[in-house]
Image (cartoon, rainbow, N blue to C red):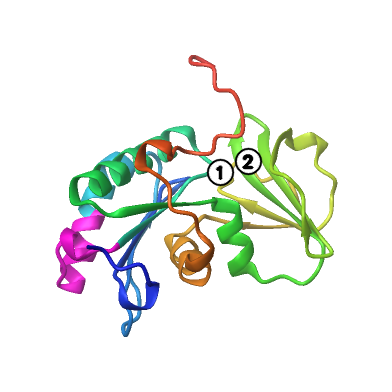
Amino acid sequence: KKNNTFMIGNVLAIETSGSACGVGIWQKNNSPIIVEEIGNRIHSEKLPEFINMALENCKLKINDIDSIAISSGPGSYTGLRIGMSLAKGIAFGANIQLYPVNTIDSIILNLNIDINYTILVYSHAGVVYEKKIIQNTETQIKQVALKDVYIEPVICVNFPENKRPLINAEYIYPSVNFIGQYFKNNFKNLVKQNIDEISPEYYSEFNIGK
């Protein structure tokens, strides 16, 4: 039977929503072990390798993991699909509870900014996912054209280096450290879901071929 309390469990976190392919393991009395790399379309090749590396570094086997936290988007359609598919396969095979973590929420927690700002997650071809944080109140995530973004302090997530037009912006990548820390801080508030109910949060309609 798996533990239900974070502080006595081993947690595997996975981030594949953008250019970062990241795996981390959080344990009660140790600093997290993180294996992460920024690259273009590396998830399918690197993710299984990084999971094995993290487990070996912690001297754990997959059956020693109590919970899996997976970045659920918004972000790259392909990256999210690869990460979620592998996480669900591991969770099902080893009977581990899987917890989806909203990518933007994990970033907000780790930024800890006390002024009004906007988070933009790059989607494709001048389209972004936008969430505004105004006086500590968060708006709903929506897909918008980058040209329609109001110029204010902006955190831009996963923008390609050749597509960074906003001057008043900080450009960052998603990180498995954000996912693990969010899970650690919010574990008691997360709702357990059946594995077949869990899927990536795309926030838009995807048309094959476009």
Q: Can you say whether 87 is above or below 173 in the image?
A: above
Pinpoint residue 202: horizontal percent, then vertical percent.
55, 34
The amino acid at mark 2 is Lys
Pinpoint residue 45: horizontal percent, then vertical percent.
25, 42
Q: Can you say whether 127 is above or below 192 in the image?
A: above
Q: Residue at x 54, y 63 (%)?
A: 189
| Left or right of 25 in this view: 52 | left
Q: Residue at x 77, y 49 (%)?
A: 139
**Residue farthest bottom in this picture:** 29
User: Would residue 42 be seen by someone viewing this image from the given angle?
Assistant: no
Q: Which residue is mark 2?
A: 163
User: Would residue 195 be seen by someone viewing this image from the given angle?
Assistant: yes
Label 2 near label 1: C-beta < 8 Å?
yes
**Gap in Å between the C-alphas at discs 1 and 2?**
5 Å
**Residue farthest front in this picture:** 1
Q: Which residues are magenta?
A: 50-66
The amino acid at mark 1 is Pro
150 and 164: which is toward the camera: 150
Pinpoint residue 56: horizontal percent, then vertical percent.
15, 67
How busy is the neighbourhood of tag 2: few (under 14 within 10 Å), some, or many (20 plus)? few
Q: Residue at x 30, y 68 (%)?
A: 3
Q: Quadrant of residue 81?
A: top left
Q: The N terminus appears in which quarter of the rendering?
A: bottom left
How busy is the neighbourhood of tag 1: few (under 14 within 10 Å), some, or many (20 plus)? few
Pinpoint residue 77: horizontal percent, then vertical percent.
48, 33
Element type at mark 1:
loop
Q: The C terminus appears in which quarter of the rendering?
A: top right
Q: Which residue is mark 1?
A: 160
Q: Can you say whether 40 is above or below 11 in the image?
A: above
